[in-house]
Amino acid sequence: MIPILRAWDDPSICHGFVGRIGGVGGGRYEALNLSYFVGDEKDAVDRNWELLRAQLPALGEVAFVNQVHGIAVQRVDGNDRGERPEGDGMVAAGERIFLGIFTADCVPILMLDKAHRAVGALHAGWRGLIGGIVGAGIRAMTEAGASLAELQVAMGPSIGLCCFEVDAPLADRFTREIPGAVRHRRAGLPGKAYIDLRGIIYDQFEAAGVNAEHILSVGPCSKCESNQFFSRRAAGGKVTGLQLSFIGLTA
Ligand SMILES: [Zn+2]
């Protein structure tokens, strides 16, 4: 059984945050790596997808982007799957269009306005956050028909304030370039500081007009729980398997 964390208790919202438990991969890919682009054996990734699909019969083909730590958000219309355009987010309007994001410490964000049939997924690491991926994601959702009043957001397992220690100059960029980010900074060793990525993202959605009760944070710190989730930091910066976060409306 593959453990899947969910944000919304509604079977018509096919979504979840998948960890690393329940697959067949070994080494840095142990066990449930679902990405074909990090050097894992194709047979292992194929088998992992089979295992996931056996557990999630409602999950159709999943659209992906070639993630580059930027802020491009692609509109997926259901006929362009398999293309994997460059970007760090996707939105879609309608049913049975499934969006997938891969992470290993960066924050996966799922977005939803069920009434207006809009879904979205974002990959938010430090570069994307400073670049403005949250604002780009909100704009793309609005263009796909979502209303801010109805927008629901869920952040998934990702590196926490406990573990995301960065050099002071980078922490200074956060606090200089993102309004309010200073509230999510803690002192570290000399020359270092800790940053709370999910805290910054929460504030950005709320400042944009999303109802605070609609902004969820799901799951633990990926580095603290690196037995359950892939964590690039826990692997000493080496390429690892990636965990999947996905969303699509089935009805
Ligand atoms: Zn941690």
Image: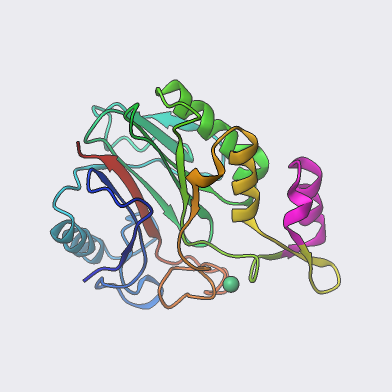
Q: Compare residues 131 and 117 and report the one nearer the observer.
A: 117
Residue 24 placement (x, y as % from top left): 24, 73
Structure colour scheme: rainbow
Question: Is 21 above or below relative to 106?
Answer: below
Q: Residue at x 32, y 55 (%)?
A: 36
Q: Quadrant of residue 184?
A: bottom right
Q: Please tell me whether the stretch drawn in magenta is mainly helix, strand or loop.
A: helix
Q: Compare residues 198 and 216 and report the one nearer the observer.
A: 216
Q: Residue at x 28, y 41 (%)?
A: 248
Q: Is residue 69 one of those drawn in magenta?
A: no
Q: Quadrant of residue 28?
A: bottom left
> Could you tell whether 57 is left or right of 171 in the image?
left
Image label count = 0
Residue 89 placement (x, y as % from top left): 46, 38
Q: Is residue 172 one of those drawn in magenta?
A: yes
> Could you tell whether 135 is left or right of 148 in the image?
right
Q: Quadrant location of ligand 1?
A: bottom right
Q: Quadrant of the C terminus?
A: top left
First to last magenta residue range = 166-185
Q: Compare residues 86 and 10 and report the one nearer the observer.
A: 10
Q: Residue at x 60, y 48 (%)?
A: 202
Q: Residue at x 34, y 30 (%)?
A: 92
Residue 209 placement (x, y as % from top left): 59, 32
> Could you tell whether 242 is left or right of 193 in the image?
left
Q: Quadrant of the N terminus?
A: bottom left
Residue 55 placement (x, y as % from top left): 17, 61
Question: Is 216 above or below relative to 167?
Answer: above
